[in-house]
Amino acid sequence: MSRLTCFKAYDIRGQLGTELNEDIAYRIARAFAQFLKPKRIVLGGDVRATSPTLKAALANGLRDEGVSVLDLGLTGTEEVYFATFHLGVDGGIEVTASHNPIDYNGFKLVREGARPISADTGLAAIREIAEASSYQLVDGKDPTVAEADRGNYELVDTRADFVKHLMGYIDTTAFDRPLKLVVNAGNGAAGPAVDAIEAAFSAAGLPVTFIKICHEPDGTFPNGIPNPILVENRATTRDAVLEHGADAGIAWDGDFDRCFLFDEQGRFIEGYYIVGLLAEAFLQKENGARIIHDPRLVWNTVEQVESNGGVAVQTKAGHAFIKERMRNEDAIYGGEMSAHHYFRDFAYCDSGMIPWLLIAELMCRKGLPLSALVDERIARFPSSGEINLKVKDAPGVLKAIESQYAGDALSVDHTDGVSIEFANWRFNLRASNTEPVIRLNVESRADQALMEQQTKQLLDAINALS
């Protein structure tokens, strides 16, 4: 069998037909079972048109290995995480391509306890097994496997338990004033979960109104692929916030493992500043807790953590690194500026639902609009946001930039790429794990002009090397 190009560093995803199909899904499932040797696995899938058939192929492959399958139906990735640890099963698979183009799909795999399976923790081994396998299938099943030896198949609904778990992160008594929220599911998997949360709010008597846009799950994505991190995809949420006079807007990607927030002015709030707010929210509940953050932008997070009695711990960006460090440190929360937020009580997994619930609670508790919660922080630590640059020789560019800037620096750190710090500004430059690009982030201490000036000089220096 030729090499399976759908295997990536952290998950499986590829173009339909050429890189991923039902036959490949079946072989991946059998390889997953042979590697993990599980007894029970949960399966979920997003709204893409091919997700049900790919999920069925996975189920057949697992069952032919004697694994019992619990099918969760239409889910977001975090619902698979939740079901894996909540039901105490041996692992889970979510069928999703998140924010990739419409002709893509893929799988996210976890083992018991919703622990991630990445290239260095099993994904490479699963790939080798799948590439070495070949099956002659009849009706999607291996005819050499006796029916009595196949695993069971069962439809399971864990959404009510999922929502009950989510509600445990907030103090409902803090919601003592009316709150109006625009929620944009992007026609992805978030809609049904939001409906269930809305019902829980109503049952608790909370005065929260949901304005739903692009709400119905639709695998044709009539309003475009849900990817709010792209500037061109933010206008729909912004306009709805302004039109309805909402207190905030929330938008999700296709499998809702990331959420993106807009303030009452319709302004998109960079994920960096949300990390600081969530750290503050948790530290109000558990003083002295440890908070994990990545090295791209750090000053705001560290100040908010330490001023609220917490301990800030830096680690390399990427879900596998964040989750591992959180477990090692028993950290209550971990945040990345890319809008991935991780929670100790959620099996250290990332969630796109817990963050906005906590921010809404914080707004009510402080009696302040979202803009007031972030404006001071943005002014204290203005940042460039992540700038992606295509280069031919990423290691060479990083080495040259470090050589150019390190001499006058207060510190140089290599946790992830290179972070170089001066008295009033700093930057991080790192190579992508998945693309031929480098990613630049710059921040300053209360000096927007300095941040912009240094960003321009860095871009000029990088372009001169490319």
Image: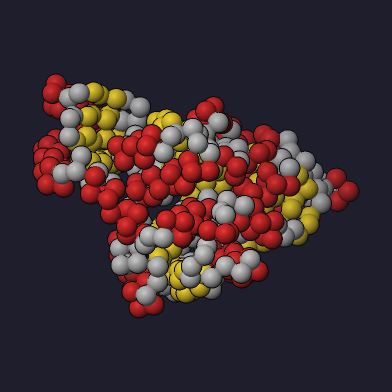
Colour scheme of the picture:
secondary structure
Left or right of 288: which side holds 459?
A: left
Pick the front one: 15 or 241: 241
The relative height of residue 409 versus residue 332 in the rendered view (above or below) is above
Left or right of 319: which side holds 411?
A: left
Check the picture and name the quadrant holding the N terminus: top right
Pick the front one: 205 or 246: 205
Q: Residue at x 20, y 40 (%)?
A: 444
Could you tell me if residue 169 is visible in this image? Answer: yes
Pick the front one: 111 or 211: 211
Check the picture and name the quadrant holding the C terminus: top left
* Image x and y of residue 147, in percent: 86, 51
Judged from this view, the residue extending furthest toward the bottom is: 243
Could you tell me if residue 61 is visible in this image? Answer: no
In terms of image quadrants, where is residue 432?
top left
The relative height of residue 112 versus residue 340 in the rendered view (above or below) is above
* Image x and y of residue 460, in percent: 11, 41
Q: Residue at x 67, y 60 (%)?
A: 159
Pick the front one: 289 or 230: 289
* Image x and y of residue 420, in percent: 23, 29
Q: Residue at x 60, y 42 (%)?
A: 345
The relative height of residue 70 versus residue 217 in the rendered view (above or below) is above
